[in-house]
Image (cartoon, rainbow, N blue to C red):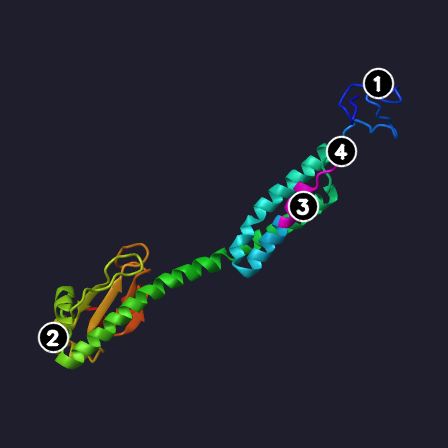
Amino acid sequence: MLCPCCGGTILRVASQCECGARFVGEPLDETPIQVQRLGPAMTAVALLMLVAAASAIATKWLAFAAALVIWAAWRAVRLAKRNPDWYGGYKTAVTTLAITTAAAASLAAYGIARIPQAWDNYLLRQKAATQSGMLHVANLLEEYKLANGFYPKDAQEYKKLIGESLPTDYWDRTIKYQSKTGAIAERRESIESIGLPLNNFELRSAGPDGIDGTDDDIVMRDGIFFTNSEIKKQPVAQQLR
C-alpha cells in the first residue's frame, strides 16, 4: 500500500513507513462502496407528477405524455430487478408503473367513447363556418334589394353590383349564388294561379363531398337554411332554378 505521507510503498504488516510516519488505525478497506442509484425510479415519479400537472393546468391532450412515464417506470423496474445492488426504488417504480398504466387505460377508454361526439362537433363547426358566410351574403343581398328593388341575377352581377366576390365555404370552394327572380317572372302567371310561396335567391355549398345535389349540401333560400332532402320535398314551383 502507499504511505499517505510520502507516497512510498509500505507493507501492511509494517508498523511505520521509512519516512517515520506511523499507523494510527487499521487501513481502510479498498473494496469499493456500492450506493444504490434511485435516479431511474425518481425520474419516473417526477415525470408522472409533471404530466399530471401539465394536463390539469394546460390541456388534457398532454396526458398522452403518459407513454413517456410508462417507459421510464418500466425501465426503472427492469434495472432494479436485474441489479438490485446498484439500483433501488423497485417498489416505487412498480407503483408508478401501475398507476400510470391504469390512468392511461382509463383515458384511452374515455377518448374512444368520445370519438363520435368529437366527429359530430367537427362537422358542426364546418357547417357553422359555411353558414356564417352565407348569412353575410344574405345581409348584403337584402340591403341591396332595399336600395334598388331587385337582387343581382347571378354571381358575376353580384360581384359587380355588391362590390365583393362570393365567399368560400369551409372547404375553400366558392359558395354558389342564384337569383330566382328571372325564372319566377317567366312563369309568374302560372305560379300565381297555384298560390305557392316563391323563393327569391339561393345560396348553396356542395358540402364535405364537393358534389352538388347530395344530402350533405348546405342550402339557404331567402335567409332560411334547408337540407337537400327538404329542398326535394318542396313543391315544384319552389324548386325553380
Q: Mark 4 or mark 2: which is in front?
A: 4
Residue occupying image coordinates x 65% and y 40%: 74
Q: Is residue 37 magenta?
A: yes
Q: Mark 2 or mark 1: which is in front?
A: 1
Q: Position of residue 153 (x, y in %)?
A: 13, 69
Q: Is residue 148 magenta?
A: no
**Mark 3 or mark 4: which comes first in sequence?**
4
> In terms of depth relative to the viewer, which is nearer, 3 or 159?
3
Left or right of 173 in this view: 145: left
What distance separates the C-alpha of mark 2 from that of mark 3? 81 Å
For label 1, the SS is loop
What distance separates the C-alpha of mark 4 from that of mark 2? 99 Å
Figure check: 87 above or below 176: above
Q: Amino acid at mark 3?
A: Met
Q: Position of residue 101 (x, y in %)?
A: 63, 48
Q: Amino acid at mark 1?
A: Leu
What distance separates the C-alpha of mark 4 from that of mark 1? 27 Å
Please give the residue where the numbered disc 2 appears in the rendered image: 185
Please give the residue where the numbered disc 1 appears in the rendered image: 11
Q: Amino acid at mark 2?
A: Ala
Magenta residue span: 34-46
